[in-house]
Amino acid sequence: MNLQTKITLQKQAYNHIDYNSNVLLFGSCFSENIGNKFNYFKFQSNINPFGILFHPLAIETLITRAINKTYYAEDDLFFQNEQWCCLDVHSKFNTTSKTELLKALNSQIDKTYDALHKTTHIFVTLGTSWVYRHIATDAIVANCHKLPQKQFLKELLSVEDSTAALEAIITLVRGINADVNFVFTLSPVRHIKDGFVDNARSKAHLLTAIHHVVDIRNGLYYFPSYEIMMDELRDYRFYNEDMLHPSPTAIDYIWNKFEATWLSEDAQKTLQTVTSIQSKKAHRPFNSDSKAHQDFLNKLNLEIKDLKLRHPHICFS
């Protein structure tokens, strides 16, 4: 008996990801889920340099700043709840020191500028079309940082708005890195605070916008993480306790689909080696001083040394 509707994915014919690739991820918390997989398996990756970003205009704003090296100044910051914040970035940057915040933001601009020049694959994971416009500056923000609600207007980005933002992102990055590949995904996390109907409208706008720019012949791809979650894993056992975010099992399932589709054969073999080493490093011995455990560690160190000869960037802490 078949208890699932399976989504059939074909192996990418070109532009595979391997251990020589440089992967840069922007977007919602789902991009962090997948990015953490890249990190665990020791790919060269950079996840959300400005923190989690939910909508395309936020990503466009920061990529534009990074490419143009438009640094932040004191006028770009706000003081709220005894912390300094910037409406363009995630709250993880918030700090009690204005100087430290500016230093962190402008450092990330430099790092993102460098990353955009050398990246081979950029992942853009979109979460919502609902945005907040800061009335005083007339700017659409990435994060309201719990500033009073009366300071913002809530808006729904049109398909045209989101499409224009994605096209701008592609044009900007390819202006400095012509060979980069883009992989677009739609986050399966539901934004229920917007309501069930408005969440569906929001996702529909994003999905349509993504498919307006996708062009496989031009290195612009779509990976159906949203459809895998909605159609293959349509059971609440695949969700966390909040019933909104994918569970670790679901993330593993989607990653396995991605791995089979996007990773080169050599990368998949190397990934198996990395998995084995990670598992061995997690081993906790009964007696750490025993000869058997010391022999185990020596053999493990030889495996790591052999792997690093082939892939010098790989490092196990």
Image: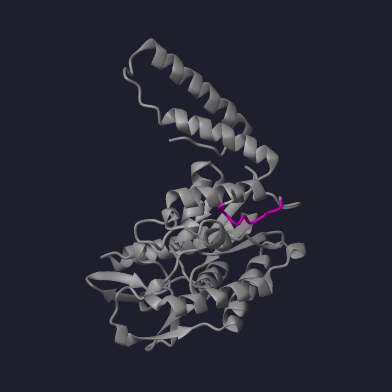
**Residue positioned 71% across, 53% down in the render:** 10
| Horizontal and vertical percent position of residue 168 | 62, 75
Q: Observer-nearest residue: 316 or 266?
A: 266
Magenta-span inclusion, residue 298: no
**Residue positioned 51% across, 79% down in the render:** 201
**In the shown orientation, is residue 220 left or right of residue 91?**
right
**In the shown orientation, is residue 78 left or right of residue 166?**
left
**In the shown orientation, is residue 222 left or right of residue 90?**
right
Residue range (magenta): 3-10
| Horizontal and vertical percent position of residue 94 | 32, 65
**Residue positioned 57% across, 54% down in the render:** 4
Q: Observer-nearest residue: 6 or 10?
A: 6
Furthest-top residue in this view? 291
Magenta-span inclusion, residue 8: yes
Query: Is residue 294 depicted above or below 75 in this figure?
Result: above
| Horizontal and vertical percent position of residue 55 | 49, 73
Q: Is residue 17 visible?
A: no
